[in-house]
Structures are given as structure tokens and as C-alpha cells.
Amino acid sequence: MSLFPTYSKYDVTPVKGEGTYLYDVNGKRYLDFTSGIGVINLGHCHSMITKAIQKQAETLCHTSNLFHIVGQETVARKLCQYSGLDAVFFCNSGAEANEAAFKLARKWGNEARLIEHPKIITFKHSFHGRTLATLTATGQDKVKQGFAPYPEGFITVPFQDIDHIKRITGSQIVAVCIELVQGEGGVHPSDRQFVQDLANWCQEKNILLMVDEIQTGMGRTGELFAYQTYGIQPDIVTLAKGLGNGFPVGAMLATERLKPYFGPGSHGSTFGGNPLAMAVAEAVINEMTQPSFLQEVREKGDQLFQSLKEMCVEIEEVIEVRGLGLMIGIELNRPVGSVIQQLTQKGLLTVAAGEKVIRLLPPLTVTTKQIQDAIEMIQQVLNPSQVAVFT
Ligand SMILES: Cc1ncc(COP(=O)(O)O)c(C=O)c1O
């Protein structure tokens, strides 16, 4: 093999996708409750996305940001309309969107608040990416090991401890970056009161509130953006994953007052926001803003969550079932690797979050029947003595 051994892979080679299903080289069908780690939110090979790619690929794929790109204006306008933010920078991945956000916060700190060495607060167990700045921002040692020296300017604090945060003021804090539901760190939804206290504190201290919606965004939690369920309005939001439904695209959204700090020459990306990426993102947004789409996500999220909770009451090794919308974690009292393997053999693909959490991220288009099928497989693996089908 001529690949770096960067990933420990499942023993599955998918070659075809259709809605919630993946098919491997041997023709075996799997229910895909990973969605490519929170990416394929509209399911595999959604007809509108395929059509958008085909049509744009026949017209114009890439020109560079030397030129005006019609699709950027359209997608940015829609993202601003639905988010309440005012300006968008397009890139290609989650880490890049966060890098853009960190750079913007620093530049604003330097120029608007005259802070020479701006600092950004992040949280323990968070995940913000694998580039040098984003792995430094990430609150998990395993992501950082071996990559010292780390860029300066990040302070990682305990998750959900507002008093701790208040105690570190007086320093040169310009922003707080939060995942409202920590994904990689174990599917931990933030407490509503904590988030509101944090938002109020940021406003009071003139500190930017930056929400990493790379995993929670694009409908995953039952709203287009998770912060909409928390009743707050951030200064900066980062997106990727579900925005392209499999086509690599990222975005950083910010408020009007931050717009001047990313002037000509301050930041850039060769591929960011190219016509092909924009055609896909526009199709994704159009699908997700259909009248009942998000309501159905919330209903299916409730169905999956309640059924799992009901089923897991009887299973001693389950510590907790938690989540928001269709982002759900089952925490066990032991490592989940072998459980995930058994589920895979049965035909259900899931992904670990940390060592002890099974993460369920089905496409938002998953059907009620597919949810029932998944629950049945989880039941067979976690609690084989009970064969009742939960609905
Ligand atoms: C919350 C969050 N932020 C950032 C990232 C990094 O995104 P990417 O892998 O596209 O760089 C991820 C990826 O899992 C994520 O879940």
C-alpha cells in the first residue's frame, strides 16, 4: 500500500451509496449511520445534489478567486439570510474554516482592540481540526501528541464552567470558540444556561463568540445551525461537512463589524468557493430549507433518542444516551471498538466518539423504518437476550 497509515480503517470497502445505504465490493448492504462522519446529511447520491454537480460540471468547475463567482454571491446571501450573520468566506474543509475564524478574531483583536497577543478560549474535549492552529485549539491531548511546538494564543478551559472562564478575564482574550454539541469528544450537548451565560459574558466583555458548527451545522441537530436551538446569536460561525454533502466545501460566517478585517490580501484559498462547490452548497441549502425538512429531522431525532433510551434502560453497560436531533451518542462503561465491529458485521455502520461512545449520525433523510432497523441491530449486539422491537 502506498498510503500513509494515518487511519485505522473498518474492514469495509464501499463502492456504491443510495440514501441511507452503502454497498460494499461484495454487494453487502449497510445502513450508514456515520454519514461519512456527519457529511452526507441528505443521504448518498441525493438526486438534486447529483443533478447540481452534473449541470455545473458541464458548465464551469473552477476559475479562482481572481474573478467574480456568481454562485458565491447566491450561497453567501442564503447563508446570511438563514444565520442572521452578514459576511461569508469560503474554503474547503472544517479545519480551514476554523483557521479563517481564528485569523479573523486575531486581526480584529490586533486592530480593533489593540491587543498585541490575542488569546482564544477553547474547551476541554473539543475538536476543531488537524492543522497546527486547530489541533492546538482542540481540547484533546491525543490529537496534539508529537506535534510540538504549538502556536501560541489558545487557552483551553473546562467545558461548561462559566465561573472558571470569568476568573481568567483581564488577559488578552478576543474570542471563545465552542462546539455546542461536542462531537469527536463524546457527543456532549452543552447546557442551555451555560451557553446563554457565556454569550452574555462575551457581549459584556467585547469578546467574540465563535461557534464551530462543522459537525452540528446543516440541519444535524434539528435546526439549520445548533446555536438556533440555544437562543444565542454568535459573532462567527464555521461550517463544512454537511454544507457540501460529500463535496469538499467550508465556510466562515461573521457579523458586519468583522467584515473590514478580512480586506483584500488578508486571507485566501485557491479552491475556496469555486463554481462547482457553490452549485452543490446551493442545492444543499435549498433542500434543507424546504418547509417540513427540519421538523422531520426533529421528529426522527426524538424517535431514535427515545427508542434508544427505552432500550438502554435494561442494559447495565450503558452509562448514558445523549444528543441533539440526529446526533446521538451511547456511552458505555467500556471501550466501544468491538461493539462497533459487531454492528458493522450486522450491517449497521456507526462511529466512535472518544473511547467509550458509539456515535449515531444517520443521514437526515433516514426513514422511520431504517431507524427501527438500526435500533434492532443495536439491541441484538448490546442486549442479545432481549429481542423486542422498539418503535
Ligand atoms: C467540530 C469539528 N470541527 C472541525 C472539524 C475539522 O473538519 P475537517 O476534518 O473538515 O478539517 C471537525 C471534523 O470532524 C469537527 O467535527
Image (cartoon, rainbow, N blue to C red):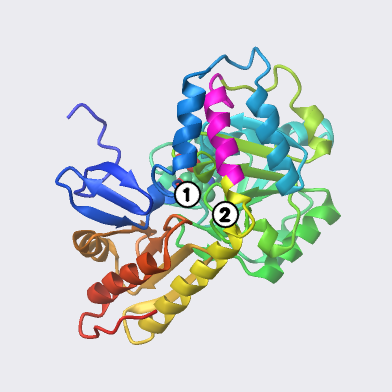
Q: Secondary structure at mark 1?
A: loop
Query: Where residue 167 sits in the image (x, y, percent)?
Result: 73, 61
Residue 385, image x and y in percent?
Answer: 20, 85
- The circle on residue 42 is 1
Residue 148 visible in the snapshot: no
SS of the residue under disc 2: loop
Q: Is residue 158 above or below residue 25?
A: below
**Percent from the top left, x then y, of residue 188?**
52, 65
The quadrant in which residue 356 appears is bottom left
Q: Is residue 111 visible?
A: yes
Point 33% across, 74% down: residue: 333
On whether residue 42 falls in the magenta region, the answer is: no
Dominant secondary structure, magenta: helix
Which circle marks residue 219 in the picture? 2
Q: Mark 1 packing: few (<14 Cα in 10 Å), some, or many (20+)?
A: many
Expressed as whole percent of the image width and height from the top left, the position of residue 222 reads 58, 61
Quadrant of image for the N terminus: top left
Measure the alpha-carbon separation of dots 1 and 2.
10 Å
In the picture shown, does residue 22 fall above or below 305?
above
Q: Quadrant of the C terminus?
A: bottom left
At 57% from the left edge and 23% from the top edge, which residue is drawn? 275
At 74% across and 63% down in the image, what residue appears?
Answer: 231
Pair 1/2: label in front = 1
Residue 355 placement, left or right of 130: left
Q: Which residues are magenta?
A: 270-286
For image coordinates 55% across by 54% down, the residue present is 216
